[in-house]
Image (tube, rainbow, N blue to C red):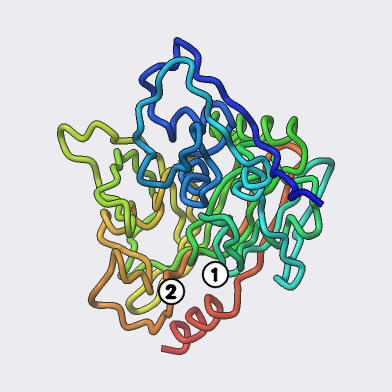
């Protein structure tokens, strides 16, 4: 019996695409992320003629008329979420085309590479396989917004395209009410609000700071807070993020001189709370008919109890 030939997807380079980088071409034509396009190359699933390409060829400038062959099965695997039924999933609320779940601290929202396990999205995909391909698709299928790995609490996913578009628009237009509980170091004197331009100073590991003159990627942010309880060396706050930006709460409070308890990145010294991770919990998220609340997780409650006892 002759060997089976793996089916390929043939992509001819149009005259308007001449000179385009290979990874950009693959991402655009296959509707993949750039990272997934590069993983395809690294897996040996892409050829031009008889030559099998590698990740090092990602910057190859293509010529009009060239035919790029992609192994069809590899393309699917590059962007498919590993469904994980063994990962616990606590649903806070659900409705047509959406669900709000409780993210534990230490669990990533979505995978960064094909085959990555232990993510919240993997647990959602195991119960809702229809989420594959929704929204941004691929390894971010159905993800409406994000929380840092060590931030706990309520987070939304969409399982149908129309709901994802609706919720993303609501976030972009600042119509979603997101409230956090935060344990900040020091005594916060009063309730307040700050408009602050933030910029990413470092990507890996991420570090955000108040923008400086000339920062091209500076983003305007608005953060509000309300004092809930004061302790000897810390303050429990309710924080609302009107805008959304990477590390917004963490970087803003650090800028104000009140970094989060347990935040080794923004408060490397002077923290005597014993917190093992930054004390930020997404307590609630609400928009139109959607409402979900997440109770304080055990580690957050234990730090509060220790502060009250002190």
Under tag 1, what secondary structure? loop
Above or below, comparing residue 80 to residue 9 in the picture: below
Question: How far across and how far down the image is residue 62, in percent?
Answer: 40, 24
Above or below, comparing residue 88 to residue 98 in the picture: below
Labels in figure, total? 2
Q: Residue furthest top?
A: 15
Under tag 2, what secondary structure? loop
Query: Foreground: 58 or 223?
Result: 58
**Circle 2 residue:** 277
Position of 232 compared to 165: left or right?
A: left
Mark 1 Cα-neighbour bin, 10 Å: few <14, some 14–19, many ≥20: many
Give the residue displayed 44% in from the left and 35% down from the top.
23
Report the quarter where the C terminus lies.
bottom left
Question: How far across and how far down the image is residue 142, in percent?
Answer: 67, 44
Give the residue displayed 44% in from the left and 42% down from the top.
53
Position of 300 compared to 257: left or right?
A: right
Above or below, comparing residue 242 to residue 154 in the picture: above
**Circle 1 residue:** 105
Give the residue displayed 37% in from the left and 82% down from the top.
273
Given contact means CB atoms under 8 Å apart, are the residues at marks 1 and 2 in contact? yes
Give the residue displayed 65% in from the left and 68% down from the top.
295
Q: Residue furthest right?
A: 96
The mark nearer the N terminus, 1 or 2, is: 1
């Amino acid at each position: 019996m002759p060997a089976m030939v793996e089916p390929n997807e043939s992509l001819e380079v149009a005259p308007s695409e001449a000179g385009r980088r290979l990874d950009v071409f693959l991402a655009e034509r296959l509707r993949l992320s750039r990272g997934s396009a590069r993983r395809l190359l690294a897996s040996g699933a892409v050829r031009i003629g008889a030559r099998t390409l590698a990740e090092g060829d990602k910057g190859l400038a293509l010529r009009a008329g060239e035919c790029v062959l992609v192994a069809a099965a590899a393309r699917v695997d590059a962007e498919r979420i590993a469904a994980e039924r063994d990962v616990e999933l606590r649903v806070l609320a659900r409705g047509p085309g959406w669900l709000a779940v409780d993210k534990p601290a230490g669990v990533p929202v979505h995978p960064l590479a094909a085959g990555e396990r232990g993510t919240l999205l993997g647990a959602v995909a195991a119960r809702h396989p229809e989420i594959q391909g929704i929204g941004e698709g691929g390894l971010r299928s159905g993800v409406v917004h994000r929380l840092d790995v060590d931030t706990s609490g309520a987070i939304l996913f969409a399982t149908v395209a129309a709901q994802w578009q609706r919720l993303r628009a609501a976030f972009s237009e600042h119509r979603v009410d997101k409230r956090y509980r935060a344990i900040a170091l020091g005594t916060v004197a009063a309730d307040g609000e700050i408009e602050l331009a933030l910029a990413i100073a470092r990507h890996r590991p991420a570090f955000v700071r108040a923008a400086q003159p000339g920062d091209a990627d500076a983003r305007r942010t608005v953060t509000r807070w309300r004092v809930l309880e004061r302790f000897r060396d810390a303050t429990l706050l309710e924080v609302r993020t009107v805008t959304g930006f990477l590390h917004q709460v963490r970087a803003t409070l650090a800028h104000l001189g009140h970094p989060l308890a347990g935040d080794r990145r923004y408060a490397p010294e002077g923290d005597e709370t014993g917190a093992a991770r930054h004390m930020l919990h997404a307590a609630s998220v609400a928009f139109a008919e959607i409402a979900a609340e997440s109770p304080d997780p055990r580690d957050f409650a234990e730090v509060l109890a220790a502060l009250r006892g002190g």
